[in-house]
Each structure stands twice: as structure tokens, then as C-alpha cells.
Amino acid sequence: MAENPHQTPRSLYRFAVATSFCTILLLMAGALVTSNDAGDSVPDWPLAYGRVIPPLVGGIRYEYSHRVLAGIVAVMTLVLALWMTLAERRPFARRFGWTSVSLVLAQAALGGFRVLEGFPAISATAHAALAQVFFIGIVGLSLYLSPWWQSDLAPLEDSGSPRLRSLATWTTAVILVQLVLGAAFRHGAFGIIPHLVGAGVVTVMVVWTGVAAKRRFRQVRDLRRATILLHSFFGLQILLGGAAWWAVVAAADAVQPTFVYVSLTVAHVLGGALTLAASVIMTLTCVRLIRPSVPVAAKASVSGTTEKARA
């Protein structure tokens, strides 16, 4: 079947998906740096001990691998933006491509600030938060470039309250805040209580959104799949959170981070990112399929115009 010339080339869409997967690897590499206490293993930036390739020993291995992956993701993001400038017809996609480049450059600058100026509780937390924002931006852009988004889809009406579009958006927002709270806890900005409170709020929002989607749009396959994806990752994240806390307590007296501690804490960070990505997919699916709400005043205006026309 010939490709629609007005749609995004499939090769561009696949490259965006590949960039998303590489960003997941970058998030894992960053989590490995934190879990192995390797954040201060390289004292200079952008070089490492004044070299392009430093001695790969101790914590330097984790920090340097993180930098290499960050460079790869930055190059892929730049290629993606240039490609979209040439091949993408929709202005929003082109603008968002260059916004992603700006985000990855800001992320690199934050990483350099963390190394050169310190303030790890603040700078490292901001670095982790911006990483999540960049990740969901790339995930959202990948969905926007997909053939599914550009296909003919019948719009749905949502008569429930609050509207599913709003619920999904707020769920994504509270998950993002929760990940920032988790990053702040990992980097020593404050204790675990705010993170636990955030987990409770996230649980309520995820369940509420899922129930609303199932009750109102049970027969809509795309929304059903998005709900399953969100609930699956969230359920796994709850289990990983309990396991990670057990690992933190068990390793409290250890001189060096244990393999179990590193594995479970990194898995918990990854699970949070994937839960956030699933919520973004759920939100954008709602945006694509469900009609936006019409203000009451606009409805009255349309109704009045219709009555005049009939008269």
C-alpha cells in the first residue's frame, strides 16, 4: 500500500519511537548513577578528568556511560527536529521538535551545573525532573507522528463529569509531581513522607480515571488498551515501590550499595517513568478521540442561532 504523501513518513515515526526507547535507557543510566553513589565520581564537565574517555573504573563507569547516552539522545533529538522540519507538514510538530532540542540542551546544562557547582539536592532533583519532562515530550511527539493519530477516527461524546480528558490530564500531572517528589527523596532534599502522600494521590487518580474510562467507553478499543497499559504499569510500580523501600532499609548499614538495592531502586525509577508515559498515552488518546467540552455560553449561542434559522 502506498504511503499517504500528506502523512508523516513511517520512517520518521519509527525514528521518534527509537528516540523514546533510547531516552528510557538514559533514564536507567541516570538512576544507576544515583543508586551507586557515583554522582561525584567525575569532577569536571564536559570532559572527564580532562579526557574524552576517562579510566572506566569505579563510579566513573556509571557517570561516563550516562554522559555517553545523553550525547546519543541529544544527537537523535537534533536529527529528529531537522527531519521533521523537512518532512512534517504540521507546524505544531515542527515547533515541538525544536522545543525538544531546547529541553535536551537545558538538561545537559543542568547536568553540568550539578557537576561544577554542586548543590546536589536541588540541582540533581531539577535534573531528574527535567529528564521526565523531556521523556514524556518525546513519547507524546511519537504518538503525534504515528499513523494512528493521523487516521480518520470517529469523535466520541463524553457526558460524564468530570470529563475523562480532564481526569487523564490531572492524572498525568500528579504522576509527574510524584516523580519529582521521589527524585527529591533520592537526592536528600527531604524525607519520604511527601512521596508517600503523593503515592496515595496518584492511586486515587489512576483508579478514578480507569473506572471512568471503563464505565463510559468500555467498547472503545483504543481507550480500553490505554487504560490497561496505565493500570498495568501502575500496579507494577506499586510492587516495585514496596520492594525498593525494603532494599533501602536492608542496605542501610552496608558500606557499598548492594546488587539487590541497586537493581530494585533502578527498577522503581524506571517503573515510575513508564507509568508516566502510559498516563501521557492515555491522556493523548482521550484528546484525540473525545470531543472537547463546549462552554455553556457557547452552547446557548449555538442553540439560539439554530432557533433563529428555523424561524
Image (cartoon, grey):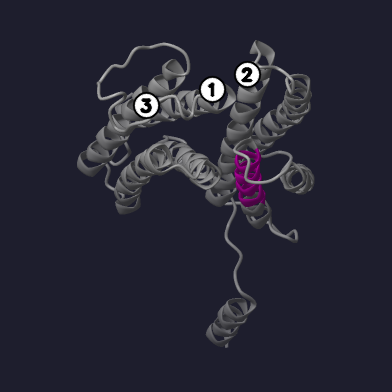
| Inter-mark Cα distance, 3 to 1 | 12 Å
Asked whether 221 falls inside the magenta stretch, the response is no
| Quadrant that contains the N terminus | top left
- Inspect this view and state whether residue 172 appears: yes
* 87 horizontally vs 242: left or right: left
At x 47%, y 18%, the residue is 59
Looking at the rendered structure, the secondary structure element under dot 2 is helix
Query: Which residue is denoted by mark 3 in the rendering?
Result: 67
Looking at the rendered structure, the secondary structure element under dot 1 is helix
Of the two numbered discs 3 and 2 on the same chain, state the one appearing first in sequence. 3
Dominant SS of magenta comes to helix
- The residue under label 1 is which amino acid type? Leu
Instruction: Please report the bounds of the magenta region as a residue range.
Output: 171-185
Of the two numbered discs 3 and 1 on the same chain, state the one appearing first in sequence. 1
Label disc, if present, on residue 262 of the rendered structure: 2
Front residue of 142/44: it is 44
